[in-house]
């Protein structure tokens, strides 16, 4: 058994696999920071930074943001003191180049490293993402089918406007999936070859997937 404070976790899986949900539960349990590159990039866009401007067009089209920009953001984030005792990366790395850079970034740190992959079929992903709605004020996430808000266009928590993320439109989802299969899926072999890969089925309930993750990572539920 290991405690989370010594873990560096990479969460892999196609868009809509439930990485964000599982990550939030894991970091709460383990007390390590949740580093989501998608969230960081959306934050840059909201703040109207130059990086946000550069990233926006790629994100809206469901394409990967150029490595240089993402690597810079991740390097900065992992250098923060709260990441010294471990972290959970969600949405990064997304390509072999990013994985190799990550390896260099954390070289010399003695923490235990694991990549956990959440496996979900393409059909299920389209169903999940097409119904997802996000609050423009507080970021809360709803689902028209699985977690419907009381009103279809208003947040239950803060009353803010609920919108569909530009990249959750069906044609964009299909592109994101193709890019995942082409650029990110090879990372499964990359981490398997290093004996660092844990695979869990993502079509069970949120709690069941969480239990599989905790057990596979050698942590208590
Ligand atoms: P996510 O919230 O993880 O689904 O990310 C949303 C979008 O942000 C992706 O479709 C990409 O356009 C961009 N993005 C997030 N993480 C990365 C990354 N590691 N490399 C390149 N682009 C990324």
Image (cartoon, rainbow, N blue to C red):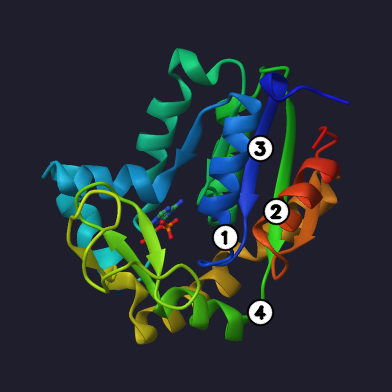
Answer whether labels 4 and 1 touch (C-beta < 8 Å): no
In the shown orientation, is residue 115 left or right of residue 35? right
Within 10 Å of disc 1 (Cα), the crowding (few <14, some 14-19, many 20+) is many
Viewer-nearest of discs 2 and 4: 2
For mark 4, what is the residue? 121
Mark 1–mark 2 Cα distance, whole angstroms, equals 11 Å
Q: Which corner quadrant holds the C terminus?
A: top right
Q: N-terminal of the two: label 2 or label 3?
A: 3
For mark 2, what is the residue? 207
Q: Which corner quadrant holds the N terminus?
A: top right
Q: Residue placed at 54% from the left, 52% from the top?
A: 21
Residue 200 visible from this viewpoint: yes
Q: Residue placed at 40% from the left, 70% from the top?
A: 148
Tag 2, which secondary structure? helix
Mark 1–mark 3 Cα distance, whole angstroms, equals 15 Å
Within 10 Å of disc 3 (Cα), the crowding (few <14, some 14-19, many 20+) is many
Mark 2–mark 4 Cα distance, whole angstroms, equals 19 Å
User: Front-most of 112 and 24?
Assistant: 24
Tag 1, which secondary structure? loop
Answer whether labels 2 and 3 touch (C-beta < 8 Å): no
Mark 4–mark 1 Cα distance, whole angstroms, equals 12 Å
For mark 1, what is the residue? 18
In the rendered image, the vertical position of residue 140 relative to residue 165, given as above or below: above
Instruction: Confirm or reject: label 3 Cβ below 8 Å from ligand 1.
Output: no
Residue 64 visible from this viewpoint: no
Q: Position of residue 48 (x, y in %)?
A: 11, 45
Viewer-nearest of discs 4 and 1: 1
């Amino acid at each position: 058994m290991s405690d989370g404070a010594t873990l560096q976790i990479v969460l892999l899986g196609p868009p809509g696999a439930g990485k964000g949900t599982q990550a939030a539960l894991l970091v709460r349990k383990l007390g390590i920071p949740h580093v989501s590159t998608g969230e960081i990039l959306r934050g840059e866009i909201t703040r109207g930074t130059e990086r946000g401007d550069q990233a926006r067009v790629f994100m809206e089209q469901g394409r990967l943001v150029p490595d240089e920009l993402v690597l810079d953001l991740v390097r900065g984030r992992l250098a923060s003191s709260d990441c010294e005792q471990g972290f959970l990366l969600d949405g990064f790395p997304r390509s072999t180049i990013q994985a190799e850079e990550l390896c260099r970034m954390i070289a010399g740190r003695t923490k235990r490293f694991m990549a956990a992959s959440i496996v979900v079929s393409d059909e299920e992903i389209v169903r999940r993402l097409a119904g997802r709605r996000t609050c423009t004020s507080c970021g809360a996430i709803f689902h028209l089918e699985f977690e419907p808000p009381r009103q279809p266009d208003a947040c239950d928590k803060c009353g803010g406007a609920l919108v569909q993320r530009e990249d959750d439109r069906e044609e964009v989802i299909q592109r994101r999936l193709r890019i995942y299969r082409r650029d990110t899926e090879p990372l499964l072999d990359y981490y398997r070859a290093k004996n660092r890969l844990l695979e869990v089925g993502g079509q069970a309930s949120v709690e069941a997937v969480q239990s599989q993750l905790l057990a596979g990572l050698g942590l208590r539920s």
